Amino acid sequence: MYYIPTTYLTVRDDEGPIVFQREDLMRYSGNRGLIASGVTFRLLGAAFEDLCPNEIPHREYFRFRTSFPGDEVRDGIELVTRAVLKGRYFVDTSIAPDFAPQTPANGAMYFEVAYLDRAFAYSFDHNIFTKEWADEVIKHQEGSLSEEEHARYLEYKYEVLGKLLTRMNVFNYREPIPVTRLNR
């Protein structure tokens, strides 16, 4: 038996299905958001599985609350679900539980996702979002001192992306929560 990671996300709107390849998220985020593209891909894949199994979810029915302030994850979620522009995406850095990996931007790798009348909370694994990851982001995300350092940082980001896309489990927390936590 083999574990075969998925390579696409399918949502629908009123006129039918829309398929996003994981490479679409990578292209949309660019090199700056490579890791964010993997976060978005795995988060949405888990949410689809947990909240609307055996159906193609309607992109307009998702709501998000997160303690992760990063633009590239937000943008990827917008691409797939249209939640940001439709007012269904909220950042609140105070909601993260202590077990969620902290980010260099004073947030955490913690997300709450609702679909219709169900909701789940997700926290990414500390074995992926390590102190090394935070240190690398702080040191290089806004630019490196040399082309060689930036090339090494880009290589590092692809390593983290590889973990996000190929590990069977990338979460340290994945549990149902009351949907009322996302009602506004």
Image: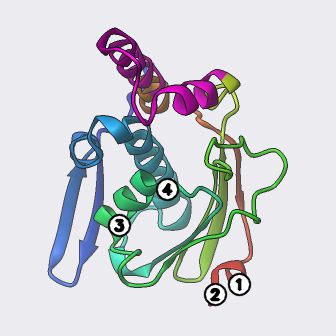
Crowd class of label 3 (few under 14; some 14 to 19; many from 20; radius 10 Å): some
Query: Is residue 4 visible in the rendered structure shown here?
Result: yes
Do the residues under discs 4 and 3 have CB atoms within 8 angstroms?
Answer: no
Q: Quadrant of residue 132?
A: top right
Crowd class of label 4 (few under 14; some 14 to 19; many from 20; radius 10 Å): some
* Amino acid type, mark 1: Thr
Residue 145 x, y percent position in the rendering: 40, 18
Name the residue carrying label 3: 78
- Left or right of residue 167, residue 180 in this image: right
Disc 4 versus disc 3: distance between alpha carbons?
A: 19 Å
- The dot on residue 97 is none
Name the residue carrying label 2: 183
- Dot 1 falls on a residue whose secondary structure is helix
- Left or right of residue 40, residue 85 in this image: left
Q: Which of marks 4 and 1 is nearer the N terminus?
A: 4
Crowd class of label 2 (few under 14; some 14 to 19; many from 20; radius 10 Å): few
Do the residues under discs 3 and 1 have CB atoms within 8 angstroms?
Answer: no
Task: From the image, state whether disc 4 or disc 3 is nearer to you.
Answer: 3
- Dot 4 falls on a residue whose secondary structure is helix
117 falls in the magenta region: no
* Amino acid type, mark 3: Glu
- The dot on residue 49 is 4
Q: Which part of the image, by quadrant, shows the N terminus?
A: top left
Name the residue carrying label 1: 180
Q: Earlier in the sequence, mark 4 or mark 2?
A: 4
Task: Find the magenta span and give its range.
Answer: 132-160
Count the marks.
4
Residue 30's place in the image compared with 57, above or below, is above
Outermost residue toward the left in this view: 15
* Amino acid type, mark 2: Asn
Do the residues under discs 4 and 2 have CB atoms within 8 angstroms?
Answer: no
